[in-house]
Image (cartoon, grey):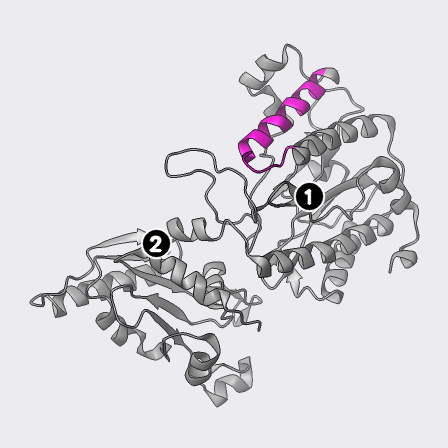
């Protein structure tokens, strides 16, 4: 586990946001897969962001009005449990390694929290997370009010959502975070390039998906950031298609949306390419339209711009393209105002990227102004066009085509850096990689 001084600074920054209120962050629980088996554990993003700690059954408590500000509750050492489920850091080691003011056993949380709550007028935690924990917190607040009813200390009398603060803090990535995201992007790039070479008529989507996961893990990424989308032909017109179990057909396109996860930091990349290695005429026309929109959006990714401005640029180019393809009729302004383009471009162009694939950061200021892009922000640019086979209102050559092109963009002081630019997306480059033997790329 990496430990850096940034975790303590992040807690201090959160302390400033909390002012006179207590803050509580809870580790993720282990999720049951079936009966007595569990999914692979993945730490809660906010908890990891402020502690660097990767174990379950842990709680961070921040008390601005106490002499001791930071309190961490962790699982105590237990030889029998560790025999079955792995080593625990334990109370003593956690205090020395994690640089937390006080560390206690999680078994003592119910007793200790009653004495930490007084002298704080509000409790900020994840209001929309673990419902049972929220019920427990309401009970602890009630006990505190009863215990200290004759004291001069106030007891908490309201609840707030701590994510209102964490969304601000996580928006700008520090040097360590950027390095993790660059590493995730590098791994994803190798996986996508290999997938282009692997795909061929009669290969199953599952084989390509397995190769992507294999390469990501081989290159040091412990997991994928999300369920991969490996969608051949018309399957690409299901935006969150994850069945990944159909045979790839000659003449179709393959859309792959997949990204590695490195130290809980995500990459999110999409490429669309011809299964047989050659774009057909109409496939090329639609692909170049989407690529033109993406390039234009990337070029306008500058400090002071906003994600909504980038989206407006994408929908303008794509809508005009739909008119040129005779999919839509009427003027550009009319089709945008009436949202006719949404039938073929139903999603946004960008989202924040970080510890979560759709990173939990604000898109607007408290004054309801769009967040302006600035150094350290990371986001996707992913325009697309989708023409389902079931849509008989369009000409047959378009039916079954679904194309999306997505890159991960890091804002710099004067512009941007495309973290996933290594993955081919120009027509000739894509076709060249598709035709190369997989062995040459490994």
Q: Which residue is mark 2?
A: 17
Across and down, in percent, residue 319 comes to: 65, 21
Are there few (<14), some (14-19), or many (20+) residues within 10 Å of tag 1? many
**Residue situated in front as seen by the camera: 310 or 24:** 310
Side (left or right) of 360 relative to 189: left
Is residue 383 within the magenta segment? Answer: no
Question: Is residue 276 in view from this perspective?
Answer: no
Give the residue pinned by disc 1: 407
Q: Quadrant of residue 294?
A: top right
Q: In terms of sequence position, does the residue under pointer 1 or pointer 2 come before the other?
A: 2
Residue 12, percent across and down?
39, 62
Residue 307 drawn above or below residue 102: above
- How many numbered discs sit on the rendered protein? 2
Residue 441 in the image: state x and y as whole percent. 88, 56
Up-down relation of residue 396 to residue 242 (above or below)? above
Residue at position x 59%, y 44% in the image: 413
The residue closer to the viewer here, 135 or 192, is: 192
- Quadrant containing the N terminus in the rendered view: bottom right
Q: Secondary structure at mark 1?
A: strand
Secondary element under disc 2, as helix, strand or loop, is helix
Q: Residue furthest left?
A: 150
Q: Residue at x 25, y 60 (%)?
A: 138
- Cα distance in 3D space between marks 1 and 2: 33 Å
Name, please, the residue furthest toward the top: 330
Q: Is residue 312 magenta?
A: yes
Circles 1 and 2, Cβ within 8 Å, touching? The answer is: no
Q: Read off the magenta span.
A: 300-323
């Amino acid at each position: 586990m990496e430990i850096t001084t940034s975790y303590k600074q992040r807690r201090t920054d959160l302390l400033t946001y909390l002012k006179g209120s207590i803050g509580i962050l809870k580790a993720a629980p282990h999720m049951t897969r079936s009966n007595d088996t569990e999914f692979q554990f993945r730490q809660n993003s906010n908890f990891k962001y402020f502690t660097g700690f990767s174990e379950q059954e842990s709680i961070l408590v921040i008390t601005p009005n106490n002499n001791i500000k930071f309190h961490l509750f962790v699982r105590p050492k237990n030889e029998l449990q560790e025999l079955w489920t792995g080593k625990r850091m334990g109370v003593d080691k956690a205090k020395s390694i994690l640089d937390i003011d006080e560390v206690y056993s999680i078994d003592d949380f119910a007793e200790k929290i009653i004495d930490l709550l007084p002298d704080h007028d509000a409790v900020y935690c994840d209001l929309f997370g673990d419902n049972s924990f929220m019920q427990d917190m309401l009970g602890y607040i009630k006990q505190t009010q009863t215990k200290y009813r004759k004291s001069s200390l106030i007891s908490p009398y309201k609840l707030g959502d701590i994510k209102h603060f964490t969304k601000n803090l996580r928006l700008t990535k520090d040097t360590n975070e950027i390095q993790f995201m660059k590493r995730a992007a590098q791994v994803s790039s190798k996986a996508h390039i290999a997938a282009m070479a692997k795909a061929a008529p009669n290969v199953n989507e599952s084989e390509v998906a397995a190769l992507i996961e294999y390469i990501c893990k081989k290159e040091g990424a412990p997991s994928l950031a999300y369920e991969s989308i490996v969608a051949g032909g018309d399957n690409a017109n299901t935006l969150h298609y994850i069945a990944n179990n159909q045979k790839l057909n000659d003449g179709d396109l393959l859309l792959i949306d997949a990204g590695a996860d490195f130290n809980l930091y995500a990459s999110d990349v999409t490429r669309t390419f011809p299964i047989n290695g050659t774009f057909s005429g109409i496939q090329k026309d639609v692909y170049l339209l989407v690529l033109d929109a993406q390039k234009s959006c990337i070029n306008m990714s500058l400090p002071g711009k906003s994600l909504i401005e980038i989206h407006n640029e994408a929908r303008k180019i794509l809508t005009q393209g739909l008119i040129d393809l005779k999919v839509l009729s009427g003027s550009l302004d009319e089709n945008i105002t009436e949202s006719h383009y949404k039938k073929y471009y139903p999603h946004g162009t960008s989202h924040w990227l970080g510890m979560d694939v759709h990173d939990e950061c604000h898109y607007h200021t408290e004054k309801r102004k769009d967040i302006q892009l600035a150094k350290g922000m990371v986001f996707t640019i992913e325009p697309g066009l989708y023409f389902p086979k079931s849509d008989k209102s369009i000409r047959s050559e378009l039916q079954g085509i679904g194309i999306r092109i997505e890159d991960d963009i890091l804002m710099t002081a004067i512009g941007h850096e495309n973290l996933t630019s290594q993955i081919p997306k120009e027509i000739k480059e894509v076709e060249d990689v598709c035709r190369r033997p997989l062995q040459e790329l490994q």
